[in-house]
Image (spheres, rainbow, N blue to C red):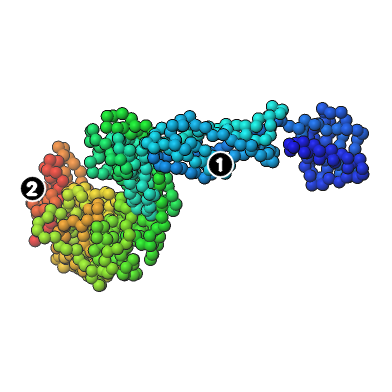
Amino acid sequence: MRPRLYWLLVLAGLLREAVAGPLVVDRMRLSAGGGRSAGGTLALVSTVGQPEAGPRLAGGSLTLETGFLVQAFAGAGNQPPTVTFATTNLTVLHDSGAQSLPGFAGFSPGPAAEALQTLLGYTVSNSNSNLFSAQPALDSAGTLTFTPAAGAVGASTVTVIVQDNGGTAGDGADRSTNTFLLTVASAEVTFATTAAGAPGSTVAVPIYLLAAGNESALSFSVNFDPTTLSFLTATVGSGLSLVANTSQAAAGRVGFLVGRSVGTSFTAGSNALGTLNFQIAPLAAVGNTSLAFGDAPVPREVSDATAHPVSHIRYLAGGVAITNHATAYEGDVSPRASGNGLLTVSDAAQIGRFVAGLDPVLTTGQGSELQRVDCAPRGTLGDGVLSVSDFVQALRYAAGLDPLTLAGGPTGLAAAAVPKLATTPTGSTTRTMRLVSGPLVAGEAAVISVVLTGTGIESGGALSLGFDPAVLRYLGAELGTGAPDGTLLVNDRRVANGKLGLVLALPAGRTVAPGAQELIRISFAVATAPPAATPLVVNADGPVVREVTDVNATPLATQFLSAQVPISLPPFLKLLGQQRGVGGALQFAFGARDQSAVTATQAARLEAWFTRDLGRGTWEPLTGALTLENGRVLLRDPDAASAGFRFYKVIESP
C-alpha cells in the first residue's frame, strides 16, 4: 500500500470513532484540504472534492466540517528509485588486474514517503566491452567489480538502470538511469606518499610517472593553498629538462614542462620526474593540505617520442601533512624558556637581548635555551659565541628567509664568563668599524660616531666601547644616518665602569650602503676639568662581541679601530651663524661668548683649519680666511662651493 492511502484509512477510522462517542486527539498535527491543525485541536473546514461525510461531527477536541479532500491524501504516482556513485569519473591503470570497489554505488527506492518499497533489480551495461576481460558489475551492497583486459587502454561509459516495485500507475515511474565514465589509463602521474613538515619548515614533494614506455614529455600544473604553502623551487632528475611557469604562484598555481631528450622515452614502470619544494606557513594549522594536478597556467598533456599526444592519463592528487612543532628549533626562544614552535619577531628581539648581554641564558646542554639562541652560523647550528650574527640569523628566521631547523650545535659557551672576542681578521681588509669624533670641549656635550666603511654587503654590527668614566658621562645612543631603519640594542649596565655594549641589525635582507656610513651616534657629557685627550677603545672583554655580519648571518673580516680624542678648553668664541655669499662662498660669523667685542689682539691669535674627513682626514690651514669686522670674526671659504664637503675649526694659538 502507498503511505498516502494509509493515512486516508486512519482518518476514516477517526471518523467512525467520532460517531461512536467523545473523541480526544491531543499533541497531533494533521494537514489536509483547507485547514491545518496546530496540535491539540484539529479543524478541517471548507474542503471540496467529495460529497459531505454527513452531519457536522464533533467529539472531544476533534471537529470535522463539510467532509475532507481525498486528493490531499492520494498524492501523485510512484517516484522513481535512484542510484548514485562515489565518483562519475573513475580511472584505473592498465593491466591493474581484478578491481573491487566496495560502496561505489548507493541505491534508494525513492523519497522518504516510499521507504517501504523495495528494489526489484538493476542492470549494468557499458559502451566498450572490449576494454574488460570481466565486465563491470554491481552487487546489492553497491560493490563495483571489473577486470581490465590485458594491454587494454581506453574509456567506457557504464550505464546502470535500477527498478523498484512501486509501479507506474498515476503517471508514476518505477525505474531510473545513471552513468559514470570508467577509464583504463595508459600511464599515471602522481605525487609521492604524503610529505610532512612542521609550520615554518620546508618540505620536498617528489612527483612520479608510472609509464607505459612510450611517453617522452609531459606538461601539468600543480594547485595548492597559497595561505598554507609557498612554492620555492622545482628540480628534475638526471637526463630530464624542466621549464617552470611560476607566474601564478601567488594564487597557488605553478606549471611545469618535463621531458627527455628528443626521440627518447621514459622506461616502462615508475620514473622519478622531480621534486617540488614548498615552505609551510609559520602559522599553518596542524592537519593536511592538498596538492592537485590542474590545467593552469600549463595544461595537462603527455606526448610520445614522435610528438603525438598520449591519451588516457591518470593524475592522482597528493598532499602535505602539517605536523606538530618539534620540541626545539634554532632561534625559538620566546616565550622563555622553551619557545612555542614559532619563529617571529619576538624571538629575534629576545635573541638581540641575549647578544647585547641584557638577559642571561637560562639553560645549557642538549635542546637548551643556549642551543636555540646560538643559531649562527646556520650551517653548524651555532659556534658557542653569542654575537650579532645570531641576531641577524634570528631576523632571517622571523622573516621566513630560512626554513626552520631543529636545534643543535654547541651545548655550552666558548668562554665561561663572557662570550669570546671574534677573531681579529688577518691580513689587510677594506672593511673597518671605527670611532669618530671631533675635538671634545670641556664641560660640553659631545657626540661619538660609530662609522662602518664597507662594501655594501653588511647587515649588522656590534662592538663594546671602553671609555674613562671620570672624563666622559654616557648620555644616550641612537641610530646614525647610515642605518635609520635598523634595530639598536644598548647594554649600558656597566657605563659606571666605562663599558658600553652596542648591537645593531638592519631588517632581514637589508644591507648598509657601501662606503663610510654612520651606524650609531653616542652622546657623552665631557668633564669640566679633563685631561688633554681621552682614549675611546673597542673592548676585547665585553659586554658584547665585536663583529660585522652580512645578510646571511656570516661574520665578515673587519678591522675595529679605537681612537684617541683630544679635549680642549671652552673657547671664548661662539658661532653666531653661517651663510653663502656671491659665487657660493661659505661664511661663518663668530662672537665672544660674553657678548663683548672681539679685539684685534684676540683675533690675531686665531687660525682657521679644514678637513674633508672628520675621522681620518688631515687638517689643513685655511689661510687668509679670517677677518675682524665690527667686533666679530668672519670666516670665509671661497672654495667651499667647488671643493666638496668640508669640516672647519677655529683654534686659538698661544
Q: Which residue occupies the foreground of this view, 472 or 334? A: 334
Q: How many numbered circles are shown?
A: 2
Report x, y in % for residue 4.
Answer: 75, 36
Report x, y in % for residue 520.
Answer: 24, 56
Q: Residue at x 9, y 56 (%)?
A: 428
Callout 1 secondary element: loop
The quadrant where residue 408 appears: bottom left
Vertical relation: 125 (above or below) 579: above
Callout 2 secondary element: loop
**Kind of residue indicated by mark 1:** Asp
Q: Which residue occupies the foreground of this view, 200 or 344? A: 200
Report x, y in % for residue 236.
Answer: 27, 43
Q: Is residue 532 left or right of residue 365?
A: left
Q: Is residue 13 left or right of residue 578?
A: right
Q: Residue at x 58, y 37 (%)?
A: 83
Whether residue 181 can be seen here: yes
Report x, y in % for residue 152.
Answer: 39, 34
Q: Is residue 518 left or right of residue 9?
A: left
Q: Which residue is mark 2?
A: 624
Q: Which residue is mark 1?
A: 139
CA distance separating discs 2 and 1: 114 Å
Q: Residue at x 28, y 68 (%)?
A: 411
Q: Using a 10 Å C-alpha cutoff, classify the residue at mark 1 as few (fewer than 14 neighbours), some (14 to 19) or many (20 or more).
A: few
Q: Is residue 469 left or right of residue 130?
A: left
- In the image, which is nearer the foreground, mark 2 or mark 1? 1
Vertical relation: 233 (above or below) 436: above
**Kind of residue indicated by mark 2:** Gly
The quadrant where residue 111 appears: top right
- For marks 2 and 1, the one nearer the N-term is 1
